[in-house]
Amino acid sequence: MFLIERIHGLRRERGSALVGVIGVLAVASIVTLTVGTLTVGALTFTNSTRAGVQAQAAAESGVDVAAAALAAGNCQPTFVSGGGSIPKYSVAIYFTRISTGEDSYTGCPSFADVDRVRVVSTGSAVGPGTVSAKIEAVFAFIPLPVPPPITASGGAIYAFAQNDPTMNNLTVTQGSTVRPVIQYLSGSMTCTSQSTIDGDVILGQGSVSSMSQCTVNGDLWASGTVDMQSGKVTGNVNALGVRSGVSVTLSSSANVLGNVYAAGPVLIAGDVGGNVVSGPGVGGSSFTNQASIGGSVVAAGTVSYASRGDIVGTITESKSGIVTPTIPFVPGWADYVYDAGAWKTEAGVQYVERTMSSCGDLAAELNSAQNSLLPIIVDTRVCGGSTDFSSINLQLKSNMVLIANGFKFQNNDIQSSSIAEKRLWVITPDSLVDSLPTCTSASASSIGTQVVVGPHVSALVYTPCDIDNKADIWRGQIYARSVKTSAPFTLIYLPLGVPGVNLSLGTQTPSLPPGAGNLGDRISIRDLAG
């Protein structure tokens, strides 16, 4: 009996133990599940936090990239990170105008009165889903000063290759604050018959072969030699060439108030107010008994003179190290390609363009155009190789541009309708941009006698061809392949220039795009919702 009861007792104890084991296992499962849940939650929280940090960093990178591009002048309406990378950024550009105060303009600055730029950058990263961050940075913006549509440039007379060297009874005077200059890129000069030039003369590749009864109230420069029979130069004479052993010759009636700089020996019988420097070319320099030198004589070679008293300063022979002065820059040819859209006033007002369909109504067309209150362009190229403007008088109420394949003026009186200054351009375009004057064979241009540009008008002539010139009075400037000046002619120099070209440098001058400027300091930066 006892044994049977003991067995039943053991069976009851085993049931109780099983309940305990199950309980322990349940508790262990609950603990495991709880720990797992906490672990997963922690991992999810960590991934989300990391994605948020990455998204913020990406947004900040977008601001930096856009700001760097704007500072370098490489604005884009939007910026995005490349390659589909994660994290990534996307940037949009906005700007504010002073005139409106609005900041809703999108894209790159495109007006001259932009004062602020907003950079809005959105960064995104992957956590549990996509996490994003948005930043707005505001920068000051400094617009570049807008250059005038037309830059006054170029000399009084410019010739690319002067064919006729004769200056006969030529008068060039200064009509503004800019000093006149006659520039021949190539070509020589013969100045005679009471010619007076109130400015400098620069012969980039040429000589003064004869100068008689001619006055240059400025400096005279020649890449070759200078021969003065009579006349006066109030500045310096500079000769960079030597021919037949002589660089500069001054006859007894020649007068140089400044200095004479010669690349080689000189023959002086006239007056020099300053010094005479001869070299580095060696040889014998000679001073006759009619010579008068107000300064010293320095020569790389020898010096002979009739009377020591005719040379006020010292005499130095066999001087080494003499450097011939460098001739001033004479620009190459500046091609002008006609573009009506480039003609604007300084206030930005577009010139009105009229293109003639028939040349038969030229006089009537110009009569109408002269009364325009807005600056006007009259394209006369339908008239063929040369538009004949002869006997057509103008009283300009505004600026006027005449476009022609060639032109002829004869018996013209060109005036302003009031004391307000007006401008006139007579242009034969050079459509081949190759830094050379390209003249078509059919083109012909001339300014004949009895042509007067009045006191309140300045006029520029631009042509890649030669000009046969006999005008009485022209106020402005002439820019051509060659300009004939053998007939009496008075030029009152006033620089005008043409759009998109700097005639003084011989270069193109591209206009600034609207809204060009520099990125200033960062004004603010903040996080945005969403």
Image (cartoon, helix red, strand yellow):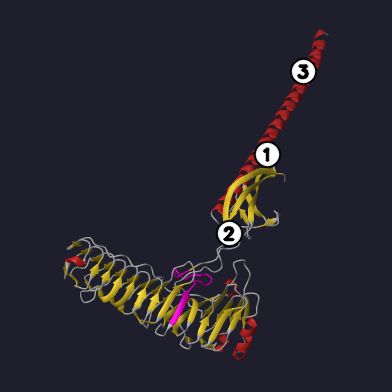
Please tell me whether mark 2 or mark 3 is closer to you in this view.
2
* Mark 3 Cα-neighbour bin, 10 Å: few <14, some 14–19, many ≥20: few
Q: CA distance from mark 2 to mark 3?
A: 89 Å
Q: CA distance from mark 2 to mark 1?
A: 42 Å
3 or 1: tag closer to the N-terminus? 3
User: What's the magenta region?
Assistant: 489-507
Residue 17's label in the rendered image is 3
**Mark 1 highlights which residue?**
48
Pointer 2 with pointer 1, Cβ within 8 A: no
- Is 191 on the left or on the right of 49, as rendered? left
User: Mark 2: which secondary structure?
Assistant: loop
The residue located at (64%, 42%) in the rendering is: 56
The image quarter containing residue 77 is: bottom right
2 or 1: tag closer to the N-terminus? 1
**Mark 2 highlights which residue?**
516
Residue 156 visible in the snapshot: no
Q: Is residue 296 magenta?
A: no
